Image (cartoon, rainbow, N blue to C red):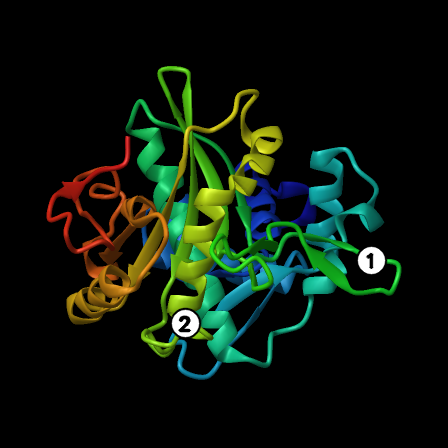
Amino acid sequence: MLESQVTTRDIAILLDVYKYRYLSLSQIQTLHFPSLRTVQRRLKALTTLGYLRGFRAPSISERIFYLDKKGADIVAIELHVDLPDLQWYRYTKAPKDYHFLRHFLAINDFRILITQACLKSPIQLIGFIPEYMGEKTVQGNVKKYIRDKVCDVQAGKIEYSHTPDAAFALAKNESAALFFLEVDRGIEVISDPERGLLKSILFYLNYWVDGKYQRYSSDFSDKPFKTFRSLFIVPSSERLQHVREEVTKFPFLKPEAKRFLWGTTASQLTKDTLFEPIWLSLDARDAALHKIG
């Protein structure tokens, strides 16, 4: 393949790798190729010519790809921006923390699933903001855009700070709904409100009462959101049951807020089931199966 023979599909791959930052071989196949052999052959050509780079990480069975210089040049042309504005060079090294990388790829899995699910549904994905999106501060650090703080509605001096794995919005019949994503790795404690999963749940409960989530109206919709849903994807049905038990018994000023926290297991989640009734409220007193949309 000559440089002048970069195809329309190649450009789409480069744009997706830029958008997702890191993509595994199977994720690129899901997005663009009908077979494993075809994607392997094309990615080998793109890496050989300097459009992509690939690497392997411990405990991850397949190669992972990110933009190389020539790929970034094409992305800048396609997006009509100057190359430095892409800031692609910040993601030109393989992450050393493979636990972070596995979690990162799991968030991308969900983003791909919901994008593909919307292609077959009247539900539209308005926008998707992953946790790593941010802006550089004057000190040179990166401030995450969706990181937020909220005061405890029962004890105002206590403050909860949290960054969701993603914030996104869906629309159907001109009505928009806000969602937050939490991909649980199964390693955090559940019962301690000072850390781990329950601490994030406390953030969402207070966030719902406080109404600070309306800041996303300017990102996704012209109108205020009626509410939001926090979606928790957990590794097993046993862990989901444990989470529901802890959330249900935890005392909270507005117990109805618990109904807006939903969970399902990773094994139940596919592009064909995502909008089906596979979601359980984390309030175990609500035994109904819920669906998005």
Crowd rating for badge 1 (residues with CA inside 10 Å; few <14, some 14–19, many 20+): few
Q: Could one spot residue 39 in this view of the protein? A: no
Location of residue 289 by image quarter: top left
Most extreme residue toward the bottom is: 58
Horizontal side of 52 relative to 56 (left or right) equals right
Q: Secondary structure under badge 1?
A: loop
Location of residue 41 by image quarter: bottom left
Q: Residue at x 40, y 47 (%)?
A: 112
Q: Residue at x 32, y 75 (%)?
A: 191
Amino acid type, mark 1: Thr
Location of residue 53 by image quarter: bottom right
- The reply to whether discs 2 and 1 touch (Cβ–Cβ < 8 Å) is no
| Residue denoted by label 1 | 137
From the image, state whether disc 2 or disc 1 is nearer to you.
Answer: 2
Instruction: Give 148 or 47, whichever is nearer the viewer.
Output: 148
In the depicted structure, whether residue 258 falls above or below residue 228: below
Compare marks 2 and 1 and give the one earlier in the sequence.
Answer: 1
| Residue denoted by label 2 | 193
Horizontal side of 167 relative to 245 (left or right) equals right
